[in-house]
Structures are given as structure tokens and as C-alpha cells.
Amino acid sequence: MPEPFVKTTSRVISIPRSNIDTDQICPARFLKITDKAGLADALFFDWRFTPDGKRREPVSFIDEPHNAARQILLVGDNFGAGSSREHAPWALRAWGIRAILSTSFADIFNGNSLKNALLPIVVTPERYAALVELVAANPDAEWTVDLEAQQVTLPGGDSFAFEIDPFARTMILAGTDEVGYVLSRLPAIETWEAAHPARIDSREGAAAL
Amino acid sequence: MADKPRTLVEKIWDDHVASSDPGAPAILAIDLHLVHEVTSPQAFTGLRERGLKVRKPGQTVATADHSIPTLDPSIPIADELAAKQLRQIEENCREFGIPFHGKGSPTRGIVHVIGPELGLTQPGMTIVCGDSHTATHGAFGALAFGIGTSEIEMVLATQTLLQRKPKTFRVQIDGKLQPGVGAKDIILALIARIGIGGGTGHVIEYTGDAIRALSMEERMTVCNMSIEGGARAGLIAPDETTFAYLKGRKFAPQGAAWDDAVARWRRLPSDEGAVYDRTIVIDGDQLAPMVTYGTNPGMGIPVTGRIPALTDVEPAARDDLERALAYMGLTPGASIAGQKLDVVFIGSCTNGRIEDLRVAASVLGGRHVADGLRVLVVPGSQQVKAQAEREGLDEVFRAAGAEWRESGCSMCIAMNGDQLEPGQYGISTSNRNFQGRQGKGGRTFLASPLTAAASAVTGVVTDPRTLPAPQSPAVEAH
């Protein structure tokens, strides 16, 4: 069960690249697990290590010493493109990331992130450009991402509001998950099902296991 | 509601909203849930932790495709993690009563190949799977999309999903495709035009004469890669081609139920005057065989074209292009045709069906693959494999010097031992050319089965329309 999440104050990791796909965030060979263990090590693995396993020189973004323990990511457009693997947000969360700011997120990644209390925060291209400059000018300043107030506060006190799905916001703030909510609506679902018989029975003729 | 013209997507949506609270996403009923070994284990664990059963096992189907080897199935699986994952899907299906098309089953295969071939995929359905290429099933006029593992758990537990209504995007492909141009070229050309985030937030409906003229398998190729254009789903209104494909398949309705179903399906196509949030029109006559040169599927050009120079693209895209070409080891401005290859991969949920294999065999028949080239032909399912063998295609591939394998995702995702080595160049009929997608350090050109097979003969990226006739005895007699 998820823990409630309200806000975080952290320094920021800036990765000024667009179209970062989930194969980069968590390469497919790390998808052979049957639990969620060890995924922090898989994060951006092939950016961090050469094919023969040596750490790249210079080190990649998240391995830069000053980026250790940072919880906010600032990334280019269309973050999380491609594969639907939830291992991508799991790996980001396992690393310690709680909020990602970008000009857009791929749909499936966006949904998967919200289900893991990882906040995808959309900013305008102008704001994004200003934020990248801000991190470059002041790399060790802390920002605050406040889900309850739907507000990001920058060093010096400037702040801006962000939009987020109100239902997901409620779930994350309360630390509840959606299965319980839907199960509470089971009578309505059963009423619908009574009027809409299943179109297939996949068990027909299936070999007994 | 009867008065307002609706799109296909809106009709399916309206048919499946089981409940909705103000401010909350709709609770959307799911007709069919497809499950595979890689994205489901943690969902079953979650179900156990909650003490829940699979609510509708009869609307759930599982297979093993991603991490399963494509070698002779009697060879033990060398990768212990993959072996454990494959054992786990089998155990999960047994425990929760889900029909499992697993190792040794004649109906095993890539989840997006077996759904249609078994007749499980039907018009008007909502279909989900923990795999982004679930959009494939949209070819039948179903609303089909990929989901994450939390959502898999939700569907297992409730047979519903919480969803916000998507926006609609009509992609109209007019005209008639030229010889040598196929479904894969349509979708690669579209993604090159709209970009890999171009369809974000939308469901694509493909329309137009060039789409209507496609077979069901070709339509699946188009819908399959909707996600590479950012659209979670892409679909095509059902028509006589759809009904003819489905009739008589194992899970398709029979007898009077068939007639009722067809009558229902005929009401699905978008109404005249229905409004889309966005529309683009592409002239199908103008399309050419497409090949990607970069590290996302939007980086595609006609096979006759040149790799872009940095000055050819918008300033904002230069950084992406420069990094992509550095990874690919390609020269800006060079011709894409003639680029050297190490490996050819023919298969995947995009292009691993029988028609794809027939096209490849039509090129490789009477020819041999280029010296030093590795050519891997992987059927999309065991049924596709059996059909190909009945037609003698396996012999064509072997005689040409290609490897003929068991079915699976194979080198599309490189989880099962089939992969490019660092630095190798592969031309692939799959769907993603992301860095490392087909193996650490591997470099991918995406193309159609026709272009891939022609390139297998020459050993370089080749325009299939320029391939000389095979050196057969009949030709030599002239």
C-alpha cells in the first residue's frame, strides 16, 4: 500500500533531453524480475555503464556526485515514451525521485507514475527553458513541490501552480490506491454486467491446467 | 444522444462506462484482458496480498512470449531469471484459473498475434494488456491499449479500469499504395510526420481508401505502432474484411450469435458528421518504402532518401538528431540505402504474421542471404509457424541461409537471448529503434518485411524495388 505523499523539498537533477523512452529509463533485460527489488540500480543503466559494464567517463547525469539523493527531475519533452513497463516509474522511485517536471509526458508513463505517487508535472516550454537556466545558474538550490497546494516554489520564493488529475491527487495525498475505490463501486459494475453479458469465455476448450 | 453523430471511439466508450462519479475517472468495463509473463508477476502478488481472486478469468487469457527462448523448446532455458518468470506465469494462471497458452501449446505466441488468430479480438470490445503494442487489436475496431502493472492488478481484481475519456485523432490515408509500399511504410511515414509524441492524449482512428484496401494483418501492422506516434490506441472501423477474417475462428460467435454480432458491429463505424479533435490527411500514392536512421521511430525517411543534416531540422530537434547519429555511427547527409548490416530480424507483433512471412519468402525464394549476415526469422505464434511450415516457407528461409525459430518477441525486445551485439547494425521489422532496444549497443534500422528481406539478400539497406531478379536457372537460360 502506498504511503501518503504531500510535498518534497529537494535539489534538482536536470537532464535536458527530449523523448527519453522507458527503454532508457529501465532497459528491458531488467524486466525479468518477478518483484520490484533492485530496480534503483537499473535506472538509466546503459547511459551510466558501457556495454562491457564499466562506468562511463564522464559519469552520466544521476551519477554526478552533486546529484546524489536528489528527488526532483527536470527533463525535456515527451518523457517516458515507448514501452508500458511500470518498471520505469518503479526504478525512478527506487532511486528516490518523487517529482518530474517536463513539457509533456507519454500517456502510459504518466498514468503509471501517478499510481506510484511519482508526480508528473507539466510546464510550458517557456517555463521549462527558464527552469533549465535556473538549475544551471544555481545547481544546489532547493525547490519545493507541494501536491496539496499544487505549487512549485523556487529558490528566492518565486512559485507557480501546476495542474494534476484531481482524482489522482486525492489518492496520493491520502495514500490510498484505486482498487479499493473501484471495489466500493462493485454494485454498479455488477448492474452494468447484468445488462452486458461477456462477449467471450476464454476458458472454452482450454486445456485444464 | 441518438442525435449527435459519434466517432467509433465514442461509441465504444459509451458502451463500456459501467459507472462514473463526478470528478472521478469513469469506471470502464474491460471485455478482454491479455496477460504475459513479464509485466504481470507483481500484479498477481498484489492480488494475493489483497486476498482477491481474478474476478473474470473467462475474460482473461495468458501466454508466454517476451522472455521465452525461440530455440528448440526441448533445450532447457539457460537464463535462470527468465525461467523463473516463465514458471511463475504458469503457476499464477493455475492458481487463479486463467487459460494459459504456454510452452508446448500449439496456440502459444505473441499476445497480439494470438488474440486475433483465436478470434478473441472482436469489434467494439475494450481490450487491455500490460504491453504498449496492445493497440494492434484496434485493427478490428476495438478500443485496445497498453497498461502498466498497477492497472493489470486493477483489471484482474475488478475487470474494469479507471479512465479519462481520450481525445480523438483522425488519420486519413487517401489514394492507393504504390508497388513495394505497404502497411509498415504507412505507419513509419505517419510517425515521421507527427513525431513520437504527436498522438499523446489521443486515440487515432485510421480512415481513407488506402486503409480500407489493407488486409486485416496489414491493418494490425498500422494500429500496432500507434504508440510509437504517442497514441495509446489506434483503431480502424470494422467492415467486410474484418468480418471475413473473424468468421469461423475459435472464439468468434457462431450461428445466430454471429449474425447478431455482425449486425451490432455494423453500427460501430463513426457517424457521418462525427467530430474529431484533430485530423490529418496523407496521400497514400506519394508514400515510399520507409527506413529509420535514428534512435526513435519518428526518425524515418524514404529508403531513397538521405540521412538529415543538422541544418535540415528545427533547432529544437538538433540535439536529438546529433545524439542519435552519434549512437548510430551514421554520417549526416549520407544515403540510407547502402548502409552496411550485420543482422536482419523478421518477426514481432508488428510484422510476424503469415502474410509478413510470405512477403519475406517471396524475396528470399531462389536467393541467398549476403555473406556474413545473420538473418533471423521468428514467427509471431506457433500457429503462424505451423502455417508457414505447411506452405514450405521454413524451407525457403533455411535454403536462403536464414534461421527459422519458435515464436516469440525475440529480438524486438532482446530479453530472451536473441539480440544484437554492441555496435552491430540490424534491419528489423519490429517497432522500436531506441538505444539498446535490440541489445546493448545495438543499432537498429526499422523497415517493412519486404525491405528487410531485400536487404538480407544484399547485406546493406536496400530499396526492395531495385533488387535484381534472382540468379535462377530460368534466368540463366536466356
Image (cartoon, coloured by chain):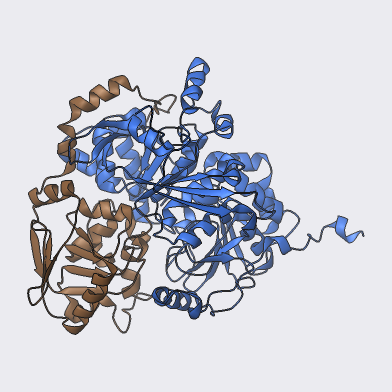
Chain colours: A brown, B blue
Residue most extreme to the right: B478
Picture quadrant where residue A122 is located: bottom left
Of B177 and A118, the residue lying toward us = B177
Name which residue lies at 41% across and 77% down.
Answer: B315
- Determine if residue B34 is in view: no
- List x then y, in percent, for residue B150: 24, 46
- Against A45, residue B225 (above or below) is above
Q: B14 or B162, which lies in front?
A: B14
Quadrant, the N terminus of chain B = top left
Figure check: B428 above or below A186? below
Is A51 positioned to the left or the right of B237 in the image?
left
Quadrant assignment, res B7 = top left
Residue that extends furthest to the top in the rendered view of this protein = B256
Horizontal side, residue A22 vs residue B113: left or right: left
Residue occupying image coordinates x 41% and y 45%: B276
Which of the 4 quarters of the picture holds residue A144?
bottom left
Which x, y percent locates residue B156?
27, 36
